[in-house]
Amino acid sequence: MYELLDKINSPADIKGLGTAELRQLCDEIRSCIIECCSGHPGHLASSLGAVELIVGMHYVFDAPADKLIFDVGHQAYAHKILTGRREAFRETLREEGGISGFPRRSESEYDCFGAGHSSTSVSAALGFACASRLTGREEKVIAMIGDGAMTGGLAFEGLNNAGAGNADLLILLNDNNQSIDGNIGAMHEHLLKLSTSASYNNFKNSVWTALGEGRFRRFIQRWLRSLKSWMVKRTGGDVFESLGFRYFGPIDGNNMEEVVNALRRLRDIKGPRILHCLTLKGKGYPAAEKDPTTWHAPGRFNPETAERHTEGHVHDRYQDVFGEVLCDLARRDRRVIGITPAMAHGCGMSRLASEQPDRFFDVGIEEEHAVTFAAGLAAAGMKPFCNIYSSFVQRAYDEVIHDVALQELPVVLCLDRAGLVGEDGATHQGAYDIAAFRCIPNVIISCPRNETELKNLMYSALESPKGPYIIRYPRGMGEGADWRGAEYELVPTGSAETLAEGSEIAIIATGPAVNRALEAASGYPGRVGVYNFRFVKPLDEELLSHIASKYGSIITVEDGSLKGGLYGAVCEFMMASGAAVRVEGIGIGDMFVEQARQKDQQEAFGISRRGIEKKIEKVFEEQK
Ligand SMILES: Cc1ncc(C[n+]2csc(CCOP(=O)(O)OP(=O)(O)O)c2C)c(N)n1
């Protein structure tokens, strides 16, 4: 079906190709990515933009001996296609048991370092470079990082260490001038300035190559430095050179010839060096070029017409509720601020960005900074709503403890994508937030069971004088509650709700799983009670004591880790109170959860009507 691509089974197969053939290969890889992503939703635009850079890396370097490390890893589809996974990629991308959307060490020897979260590549590459030096291996180490990922604090830490240590490391900066939304921040401005001083850099690099080794080169190098310092005044300074890297570029990262020439030149230079490559996100698919934010991860689409298939949302998504309620609260209270680390579109905060731009802050991929920035705002009397995906807040653990909880600052931490997330797989599961934060003093952890409860918890969090006030809710569609029609109601902190009284088994559930518990319990009227523990911390201890005195068995249900989660909390309470009650838990076990459809993952852990029914039957059976 693809004239060239079908013959490529490993990077060795591209080594003999000429430039025209490499260009054709890039076209075929693009078609393959578009065809595959149209039916297997994935990260389309980023992968399309990086094709020439990846082909160039495999052409010039010798993986797997040479180490190619991808930041985030969502742009690495061409790498998967070239490294013996073409058919599996086409047939199983992001499916259960199939090819991951990110590099994975367990998937291929060519994936030397796994990813999914941003800004790790420089540090990981430095690790490889140091190991290579210490063991006397000759391998080259190349990290590929986007301009968005380069804004993350971890990337700066890596640069700081690598530049000072004179590490032998090449960084390919894939600068498409976009994160998911438009990229932001001072580093972004700096890259723009560097791009516009391209003529100086081209001049410098040609002189460097033409001179060869020797004293004359060193003299010219000094002269170039003075020229650079003049340029520095004009461009605002080259941060990479100041950090000890040799900066090359910018080059056109979608021009195959330029990419190969630059990589060949840089392959044999030693030391920390960075090649600045300008690319077009979505390259080769007009709809994605035009709107890279929507086409970052567009879902299923018709490749011919670029018509996107809506996933049949019959109800509003939690993200719609969050976005609208935040705007409404911001209209009512001037102290309300919205903060997102680069996920405005995904979390629903774009609405606030257009309605109240001065109270909206996209801080870049900087979860740690987002939390401490929110703490500063709260200390100064504002009411920050900081929205972070559950798995990304793991980055900001210390900031939540040290800057927010310790000072009891009223920061509202909205954790989107809590629970099982589906096809993004193990790196993105929002499984650990309850367990991670439950042990921290002063933290309030809430989980709305539906859209209206999310609205009311956001309102209650605004009214709370103390924090951190965590509201965790899942990815995607709500329960169909009439949240727009409902007036705001204050939810007392730590209060649970009795939804059905029973006599034999009590189901203590949190989040939307409460509704599945109600459905399951409806088959056992009067026997199975259902309690909505919308706060996992503080726990409603009065209600728990009541439950302990009334029931012989408890089933907890949560879309999160059992260890340290609601299950852990209820067990601790029952042990401490000496209650003679048995506690069974439904939730995520002690394992990383791989990619699959979100519904299938929930079913696999029993976080579903059927799963809860099964557990009820098991408990009844064992009670006999
Ligand atoms: C720690 C962390 N925060 C947020 C994200 C979500 N995320 C995935 S890709 C991306 C944008 C990355 O931009 P860039 O590095 O420029 O790559 P591009 O997609 O533009 O090629 C973001 C914010 C993440 N993966 N990890």
Image (spheres, rainbow, N blue to C red):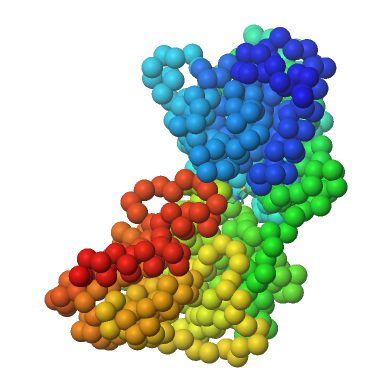
| In the depicted structure, whether residue 216 falls above or below residue 538 | above
Does 257 sit above or below residue 103? Answer: above
Residue at (24% x, 80% y) in the render: 551
430 w.r.t. 36: above or below: below
Q: Nearer the viewer, residue 443 or 277?
A: 443
Q: Is residue 284 left or right of residue 607?
A: right
Residue 15, how many percent across, how many down?
68, 12
Residue 342 x %, y %:
63, 56
- Front residue (pair 123, 587): 587
**Viewed as shown, does residue 211 lie left or right of 76?**
right
Q: Quadrant of the N terminus?
A: top right
Image x and y of residue 482, in percent: 62, 83
Q: How many labels, in total?
A: 0
Residue 524 seen anywhere in this rendered image of the structure: yes
Q: Toward the viewer: 506 or 271? A: 506
Residue drawn at the location 70% of the way across and 28% of the way down: 53
481 left or right, relative to 29 = left
User: Quarter-wise, where is residue 181 in the image?
Assistant: bottom right
**Residue 266 shows in the view:** no
Q: Quick check: 179 above or below 337?
A: above
Q: Please name whichever residue, 615 or 160, is drawn nearer the observer in this view of the structure.
A: 615
Residue beneath the point at 38% across and 83% down: 525
